[in-house]
Amino acid sequence: MEHLLNPRVKNIQISGIRQFFNMIQEYDNVVSLTIGQPDFPTPSLVKEAGKRAITENITSYTHNAGILELRQAASAFVKERYGLNYDAANEVIVTTGASEAIDIAFRTILDEGAEVILPAPIYPGYEPIIRLMGAKPVFVDVRESGFRLTAKALEQAITANTRCVVLPYPSNPTGVTLNKEELQEIVNVLEAKDIFVISDEIYSELVYEGAHSSIAQFPSMRDKTIVINGLSKSHSMTGWRIGFLFAPAYIAKEILKVHQYNVTCASSVSQYAAIEALTAAKDAPRMMRHQYKRRRDYVYHRLTSMGLSVEQPTGAFYIFPSIKQFETSSFDFAMRLVKEAGVAVVPGTAFSEYGEGYLRLSYAYSLETLKDGCDRIEQFLQEKI
Ligand SMILES: Cc1ncc(COP(=O)(O)O)c(C=O)c1O
């Protein structure tokens, strides 16, 4: 019966990050710098709110779009932090993590043959959904422009079939962000075109230089932009599965139908915890941001001292050094690091073929672990390469 399974599903692959992670499980005494998961506990106030929701039997379905109080809190949060304006009643959807928001946004705007522009190397969560829709990912190589999508490269990639551009900044895996001026240039290309933007801003609270800028801040772009965000990274809540989708009412109305048939609503218990995260615990990201910045400075300093060429990250919690000088594939290099140095990092090719020649390190680990990991890499470079 296997031949009857949907070929589009058969043709997509498990994420390269997970594949690599699973493969290295058999090796002992390995320091892992692989996972993009905050190492802080969820803030206590948030956990208490979740417990209270269970005790008080707030355990039934909620409004499909999410509890209104949470949508209001999310709307107020992005207004205060980023100057974005979304009506809680009909422009905000609470999703099961940013992952679901990505899925339902693509499923609402894509059909067969539609093209989606992806600046690469890029987070592997977009391409499979695009392919499942029979749409076409169009990768734009941003390795030579400091991993930033430029107006020129964007313009060259646009065709009559372009339906959407994904702006994944702050970036996983490179840690690069786009500032207002860089966004303005992209806006100049897009504002007169009928092309949607999906702006994945899941790392917006983890920006170390200047303030986070969103393309939805530009009035000419708001009407065609879908902003995705969530609490996984900002509040260390990956397992609670709370994401947010912000879009103009005419788009949100259609996305809500897909969301409804997909999950009905996000978990009620998690939604109550999320209200607390965005109100009483809304400053929690500041403490974590401070720690991540120290770790970024440490790892950046260590890697550059080893002679590796690396773009200084300005956001998220990843760093993406080049290993081109060693003339070996990212995969082989990462495998050797596991086997010979006892340190695990993700090969750049987990982020599309345009990640070849790079490694992704996550610094969402304690300084102690980061030191151990960097020492091992340094020793490997000195003795084995
Ligand atoms: C760029 C990006 N978008 C979305 C997600 C998914 O986040 P969530 O846990 O909210 O589903 C991740 C998770 O690593 C990510 O790196």
Image: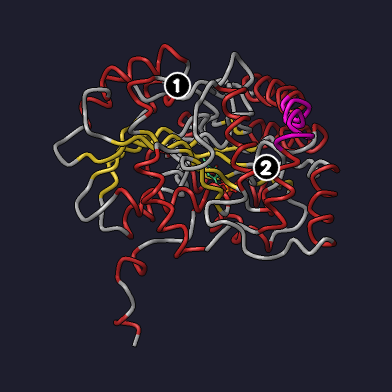
Mark 1 residue's CB less than 8 Å from ligand 1: no
Q: Position of residue 305 (x, y in %)?
A: 66, 19
> Magenta stretch containing residue 285, yes or no?
yes
What is the distance, in whole Å, between disc 1 and disc 2 at their CAs? 34 Å
Towards the viewer: 146 or 87: 87
Q: Residue at x 59, y 42 (%)?
A: 71
Place of residue 58 in the rendered image (x, y in percent of width and height, measured from the top left) = 74, 61
Task: Point out residue 148 in the picture as x, y percentages from the top left corner.
Answer: 41, 24
Ligand 1's image quarter is top right
**Secondary structure at numbered mark 2:** loop
Mark 2, residue position: 33
| Residue occupying image coordinates x 79% and y 57% | 53
Magenta residue span: 278-289
Q: Is residue 312 magenta?
A: no
| 220 vs 369: above or below | above
Q: Residues within 10 Å of mark 2 (few under 14, many from 20)?
A: many
**Left/right of residue 337 with respect to residue 107 in the rendered view:** right
